[in-house]
Image: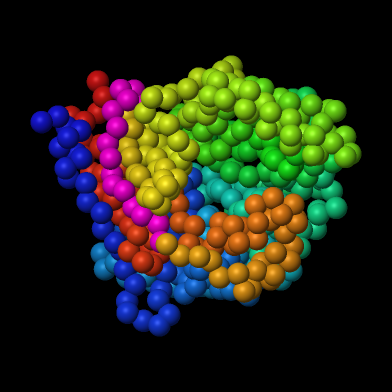
């Protein structure tokens, strides 16, 4: 029996947070796939607890932020916050010194609070955080009010102060000194929009998915902006952690990614497709051209059919050369949320979106050998979102966002019923954590991956 078969047979799925029989039920979740849920000692997992998941949060909804004790499986609440969403939680970020940062409302803006494991508030900063350095000294933040207005990863309840500007000079990536709370604008949206032959136009721009490289030397992020046909254009960009050397590595349709190492990134999408170039043509950005742009997009899609230029893959992007080549396209055939194992970066964990039956898959891939290990299949709930409070959710949202997809669909995407697995590794590679809803409530689950770091299972 090969080590992969042995590993596959030993996969264990453990629910840490199965709701008690209470009214209403408790739901627990973490958020995105780009940060670790465990503390540095590996005995606690950050989590949020809510009692309502069938609608998007309003500005008055509260989540309890705390942690799950691995020994007892019990949730320990530490503080309450309104700065959360279901896809990405409240960006709970553990520090090496103990405790974690959690985003929260600070007076009339979004900020962050560092809380000790005993519940003491240690420091408050006036900028909501998206990521922190591995040594816990530096944080990087984004405008979560702008993300709420233009995307799906913001916080409801505060207006975007830069709403009148397509590409503001006063907003972008913020650097935070996590010892003193000092804040400076590291990189503006305006600088990003005009870099590498970019064009501001009149579409509104935003930055999202900010991830430091393993060495913290560079910050990788997505730059997105609206086009006249109602779609989004995507650019994969990075900047040195001191704010210099801004670079565009790929553009087209780009989605979820992770650093493979300091020089390579794995990302889902396509680059250089005809339809993407056509959508950005200056003539199609003129006033009144939107209907023609949409028609042209449909024509090109029909004409290209399954042509290679229209297909999407997981791409390996070289940060130095900007080359982008498909990685295991015969195996990885759909979008998902990848994360490389910190203890052995030859292994990547990745999920899938629900299939037509509402089932999501969780897999491990050895990126050197192409060996794929299944970690299970998890169905979604067959439930519709509650839209009765949607007006409160949409108060500061750009109408184009919900007009293009419909209010009910937007309500589903921003509710807790839309539950991607979002797998994230434990630092030592012995386990992964997912959010799932397959048992009827939204909970966090631990997947045992102990064998993945066993020497006999490592690729030669």
Residue 42 drawn at (x, y percent): 33, 54
Residue 430 drawn at (x, y percent): 27, 45
The residue located at (32%, 64%) in the rendering is: 439
The residue located at (66%, 35%) in the rendering is: 234
Q: Quadrant of residue 440?
A: bottom left
Farthest residue, direction bottom: 23
What residue range appears in magenta?
A: 367-381
Residue 145, above or below 72: above
Farthest residue, direction left: 1
Residue 310, above or below 92: above
Residue 418 drawn at (x, y percent): 49, 57
Picture quarter with the N terminus: top left
Q: Judge whether residue 350 is colored magenta.
A: no
Q: Quadrant of residue 60?
A: bottom right
Picture quarter with the C terminus: top left
269 lies left or right of 459: right
Residue 36, above or below 383: above
216 lies left or right of 207: left
Tell me if residue 159 can be seen: yes
């Amino acid at each position: 029996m090969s080590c992969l078969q042995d590993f596959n047979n030993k996969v264990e799925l453990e629910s840490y947070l199965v709701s008690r029989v209470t009214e209403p039920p408790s739901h627990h979740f973490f958020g995105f796939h780009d940060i670790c849920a465990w503390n540095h000692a590996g005995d606690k997992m950050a989590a949020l607890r809510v009692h309502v998941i069938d609608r998007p949060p309003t500005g008055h909804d509260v989540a309890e932020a705390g942690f799950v004790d691995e020994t007892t499986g019990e949730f320990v609440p530490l503080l309450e916050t309104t700065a959360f969403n279901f896809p990405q939680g409240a960006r709970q970020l553990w520090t090496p010194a103990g405790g974690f940062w959690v985003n929260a409302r600070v007076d009339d803006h979004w900020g962050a609070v560092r809380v000790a494991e005993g519940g003491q508030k240690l420091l408050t900063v006036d900028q909501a955080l998206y990521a922190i350095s591995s040594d816990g000294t530096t944080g990087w933040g984004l405008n979560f009010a702008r993300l709420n207005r233009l995307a799906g990863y913001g916080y409801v309840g505060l207006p975007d102060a830069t709403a009148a500007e397509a590409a503001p000079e006063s907003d972008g990536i913020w650097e935070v000194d996590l010892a003193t709370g000092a804040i400076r604008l590291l990189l503006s949206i305006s600088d990003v929009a005009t870099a590498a032959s970019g064009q501001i136009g009149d579409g509104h721009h935003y930055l999202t998915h900010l991830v430091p490289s393993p060495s913290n030397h560079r910050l990788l992020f997505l730059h997105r902006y609206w086009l006249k046909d109602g779609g989004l254009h995507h650019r994969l960009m990075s900047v040195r952690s001191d704010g210099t050397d801004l670079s565009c590595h790929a553009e087209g349709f780009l989605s979820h990614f992770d650093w493979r190492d300091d020089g390579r990134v794995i990302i889902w999408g396509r680059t250089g497709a005809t339809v993407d170039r056509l959508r950005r043509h200056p003539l199609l950005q003129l006033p009144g051209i939107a209907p023609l742009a949409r028609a042209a997009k449909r024509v090109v899609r029909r004409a290209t059919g399954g042509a290679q230029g229209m297909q999407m893959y997981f791409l390996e992007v070289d940060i130095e050369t900007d080359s982008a080549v498909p990685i295991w396209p015969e195996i990885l055939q759909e979008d998902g949320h990848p994360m490389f194992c910190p203890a052995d970066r030859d292994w990547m964990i990745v999920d899938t979106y629900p299939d037509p039956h509402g089932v999501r898959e969780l897999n491990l891939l050895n990126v050197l050998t192409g060996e794929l290990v299944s970690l299970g299949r998890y169905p979604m709930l067959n439930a519709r979102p509650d839209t009765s409070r949607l007006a409160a959710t949409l108060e500061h949202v750009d109408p184009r966002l919900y007009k293009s997809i419909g209010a009910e669909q937007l309500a589903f995407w921003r509710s807790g019923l839309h539950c991607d697995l979002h797998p994230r590794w434990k630092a030592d590679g012995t386990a992964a954590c997912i959010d799932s809803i397959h048992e009827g409530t939204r909970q966090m689950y631990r997947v045992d991956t102990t064998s993945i770091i066993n020497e006999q299972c490592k690729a030669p």
